[in-house]
Amino acid sequence: MVQGSVILRKNEERRLLAGHQWVFSNEIAAIDGAPENGCLVEILTAHKTLLGVGFYNKNSLIAVRLISRSPINDLQSLMMKRIEKAYELRKTIFPTRTAYRLVHSEADLLPGLIIDRYNDTFVMQLNSAGMENNKSAIVEALQKVCDAKNILTAHDSYLRGLEGLPDENEVLTGNCSTEIISDGVLRFNVDFTKTQKTGFYFDQTENRKLAAQYTKGKRVLDAYCNSGGFGIHALNYGASNVTFLDISSQELTNTRANLGLNKLYDENSVSFINADVFEYLASCQSEGITFDVIMIDPPSFAKSRKSIPIAEKAYEKMHKLSLSILEAGGFLITSSCSHHITEDMYTETVRKAATKCACSVQLLYSVSAAADHPQLPSMPETRYLTFQIYRKV
C-alpha cells in the first residue's frame, strides 16, 4: 500500500509534530522508492523516525498530505471511519437538518476532500490526488454510512490545477438534478447544473441569521448576493427593502426563485441589479443613493500569498465605497473567504476605509464559519472565513 518514504530535512518535522498536516516540497531532503502521485508514503524525520503516512504528489507545492500518524493497514476502512465520525458530528450540531457540510477536508482528517450534503444528494470536491485516487472508496462510504442516493462532483478548478488534476465534473451515482434544502429557518432551491461551488454556501448559514437581526425596517443592499441568502433572511426578519446585486444574471434568477419558495417575493420590497459590485457602489456614491445596511460577501480576492497586497487594496476600496453610501448609524456586514487574509488584516482594511471616509466604525462581531466547518488550531489554513459586523458612527 505504501509506495515509498519521504525524508524531511533536519528540523522540518516541528510543524507536523505541532499538529499541522502538510509537508511542502522544499522541506523534503530525499525520497526513497518511486511513489506515484496520489499514493501513500511514509513521512520520516532526518533521523528516519516515522511521523506518519500521507498522500504524495510530486506536482504540488504541498508534496504530502498527512492522513495518519501511525501505519495504515486498510486505507478504505480508515476513510470509512473518518466519514462516520464526520457524520456523527454533523448530526450532533444540526440534529434536525439534512443539508450541511459533511466533510471539511483537513479539519476532518480527510485531506483534500470536501463533501456537502443536500438531503439525499452529496456533492464532492476532490482537491488532492490522493482523494482522486480513492474516489470509489469515498462513494462506497457515503452509500453505506449516509445512504447517499446521488453523488456528484463540483470541483474547485483552481485547487485541482495546483494538484495537476483535470477539473471535469461527473455524476458518480444516481442523477444530477435539484434539491430543496432548509438552513433551519428558510428553504432554498439548489439546481446543481446552475450554481456556484457545490451549490450552496453552508459556511455562512449561522452568519445569515445573525446579520438579519440588524435589518428590521431597514433598506438593505445584498452585494455579491449569490442565491440571495443574506437578503432573503433580512426580508424574513422584517427589512423594508432589499436590493439584490450580482454580476451573474443566473444568480439573480436563483434569488427570485428562492424568494418565491419562501413566499417573500414582493415587487414593492425587492429590486435586482445585474452589475459589477464595484461599479454599482461607485454609481450609488455619485448619485447619492444610500442604504441603512450593506451586506457584502465577495469571492476570494487572495488565491495565493503573492496576491495579498492586491487583495488588501481591493478590500479597502470595497469598504470605502460601502461606507460612503451607508447612512450614519447603519451597519456594514462584510466577509472575506481567503485564509491568506487574516482576521486582523481584514479589520485593518475596514479601519483604513473608515479613515478615508472621515467616519468611525464600531466592530460588533468578528466570527468565522459555521460549526460544520471545524478548524484545527494547529493549522491556520482551516480558518478561512472572516465575518464581521460594523456600525458606522
Image (tube, helix red, strand yellow):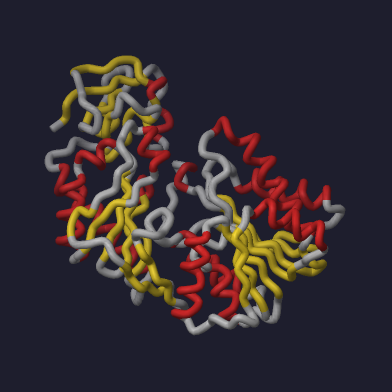
Residue sitting nearer the eye, 28 or 353: 353
Picture coordinates of residue 341, whole percent (x, y): 59, 43
Q: In which quarter of the image is residue 187?
A: bottom left
Q: Which quadrant of the figure contains the C terminus?
A: bottom right
240 horizontally vs 336: left or right: right
Picture coordinates of residue 217, whole percent (x, y): 69, 81
Q: Which quadrant of the figure contains the N terminus?
A: top left
Please say whether residue 153 is visible from this viewpoint. Answer: yes
Picture coordinates of residue 350, whole percent (x, y): 72, 51
- Number of labels in the image equals 0
Residue sitting farthest toward the top:
30
Classify 159 as above or below 357.
above
Residue sitting farthest toward the right:
358
Picture coordinates of residue 313, whole percent (x, y): 69, 40
Residue at horizontal 42 percent and vertical 29 percent from the top: 14
382 horizontally vs 359: left or right: left
Residue at horizontal 28 percent and vertical 60 percent from the top: 122
Residue at horizontal 57 percent and vertical 30 percent from the top: 306
Please say whether residue 365 is visible from this viewpoint. Answer: no
201 horizontally vs 296: left or right: left
Residue sitting nearer the eye, 30 or 190: 190
Classify 70 as above or below 114.
above
